[in-house]
Image (cartoon, rainbow, N blue to C red):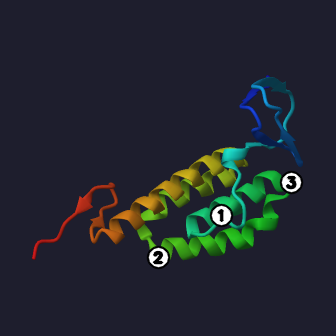
């Protein structure tokens, strides 16, 4: 079954190891085959990978587009260990990414890594406001 891709004007998409840049008009096309595809908005660059979760996303992205995921395993497992030690509540999200990697579904691993980025942002927001965060995602205010 072919994948239907619709691009906005001037949007880019990565298909395999090629970058396709759309013209100034909306375009729709079908991709038939088994090749990694990433929209421009989903591509993480090394410059933008400025948090632990974003570095995990970048590593999973490299697994997805690189052809040999095991090349990135050492880096991934080191990053995974660091984030779980710093934020143990992130373990369930890391486990979800791990399961997708182990089953070879790297696109789903990327989607799960995006959830980890969102969770990390939530933790940082609560930490900067002086609030704690329970594993369920609710804030916990301590009384004086």
Mark sitting on residue 67: 3
Q: Which SS class for mark 3?
A: loop
- Asked if 136 appears above or below 133 in the picture, the reply is above
- Where is residue 56? Give x, y as percent: 63, 64
- Where is residue 136? Give x, y as percent: 32, 55
Quarter holding residue 19: top right
Residue drawn at (46%, 61%) of the image: 121
Residues at circles 3 and 2 in contact by the CB criterion of under 8 Å: no
How packed mark 3 is, by other alpha carbons closer than 10 Å (few <14, some 14-19, many 20 or more), is few
| Quarter in which the C terminus is drawn | bottom left
Mark sitting on residue 107: none
Name the residue carrying label 2. Answer: 86
| Quarter in which the N terminus is drawn | top right
Which is more toward the observer, 112 or 43?
A: 43
Name the residue carrying label 1. Answer: 48
Q: Which SS class for mark 2?
A: helix
- Where is residue 46? Give x, y as percent: 72, 66
Res 19 seen here: yes
- Determine the CA span between mark 3 and mark 2: 31 Å
How packed mark 2 is, by other alpha carbons closer than 10 Å (few <14, some 14-19, many 20 or more), is few
């Amino acid at each position: 079954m072919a994948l239907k891709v619709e691009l906005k004007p001037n949007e880019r998409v990565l298909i395999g190891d090629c970058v396709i840049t759309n013209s100034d008009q909306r375009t729709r096309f079908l991709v038939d085959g088994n090749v990694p595809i990433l929209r421009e908005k989903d591509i993480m660059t090394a410059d933008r990978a400025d948090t632990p979760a974003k570095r995990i996303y970048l590593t999973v992205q490299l697994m997805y587009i690189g052809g040999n995921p095991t090349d990135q395993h050492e880096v991934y497992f080191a990053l995974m260990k660091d984030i779980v030690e710093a934020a143990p509540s992130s373990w369930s999200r890391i486990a979800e990414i791990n399961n997708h990697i182990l089953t070879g579904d790297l696109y789903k691993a990327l989607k799960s890594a995006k959830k980890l980025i969102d969770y990390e942002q939530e933790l940082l927001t609560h930490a900067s406001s002086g609030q704690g965060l329970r594993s369920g995602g609710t804030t916990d205010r301590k009384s004086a």
